Image (spheres, grey):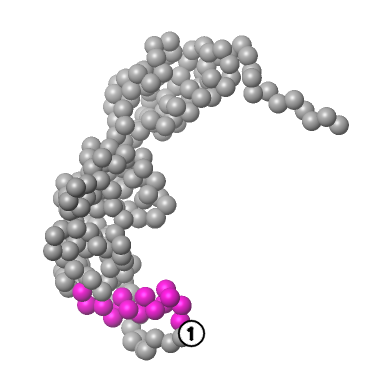
Amino acid sequence: MTIHVKDVMGMVAIAVLENASFADILAAMKRYAVGAVTVIDADRRPVGVISQDDLILKEIDTVRHPVTIFESTRTRAEHRKAAARTAAELMTSPAITVTPGTPVKDAARTMHDKRIKQLPVIDVITGRMVGTLHEADVLRVFTRPAEELRSDIRQLIGSGFSITVDRGVVTIGGHVERSSQAIALVERVRQLEGVVDVISELTYPRDDLFLAPPLM
């Protein structure tokens, strides 16, 4: 069973409008105890994101000197954000989004690759924000009940194997014909949402992955 964003997402759209003030942004972060907020336009469509790191620039970058040709693009952006007063000036754009139908595994990969802790969830038709996916929501897949996880594994690999689940760690026992089949079966189980690791107790009479030593 594939777990989708809609199965674990928070139904509160944690966002501020483009004209929100610095104080409004801080208040939203404090209210929802989050490290970032999505910036939305008048139609509730995400246009950017503001993190606590963006707000901290107001404290650490206190010199409002003119931009020079010797500054990097990143430094110029930091000076601009430090002088910003509204969400539209502070935000990083465009916003990275997911939809309710996005597999949690894909959302987790996006979070990891982009180094972000939450994602705005948008309606696939209107583009409007309908919720927020947090890192903690993604990690909930690893707390699935053992029976539920065992049932999914049984559907995936069939009834000819023993399956035990202990805190997300799956042990599979049984018999297959070749070592390559054992490896493929273990990898299929490892891809299931909620599986922390897989221990193989599979036996096989034929090792078809044996590599002959190179000729001298």
Residues 137 and 165: in front is 137
Residues 128 and 20: in front is 128
| Above or below for 67 versus 187 | below
Q: Residue at x 28, y 48 (%)?
A: 98
Give the structural element (helix, strand or loop) at label 1.
loop
Q: Residue at x 86, y 31 (%)?
A: 216
Say whether residue 215 is left or right of residue 185.
right
* Horizontal and vertical percent position of residue 9: 23, 44
Q: Total label count?
A: 1
Three-letter code for the amino acid on which mark 1 is drawn: Phe
Residue 24 in which image quadrant: bottom left
Any part of residue 108 in sight: yes
Say whether residue 190 is left or right of residue 60.
right
Residue at the far left: name it.
42
Residue holding disc 1: 70
Dot 1 crowding, Cα within 10 Å, few <14, some 14–19, many 20+: few
Task: Residue 82: say if magenta.
Answer: yes
| Above or below for 88 versus 152 | below
* Horizontal and vertical percent position of residue 40: 19, 62
Quarter of the figure with the N terminus: top left
Region rendered in magenta: 70-86
Residue at the far front: name it.
125
* Horizontal and vertical percent position of residue 7: 23, 37
* Horizontal and vertical percent position of residue 138: 31, 42
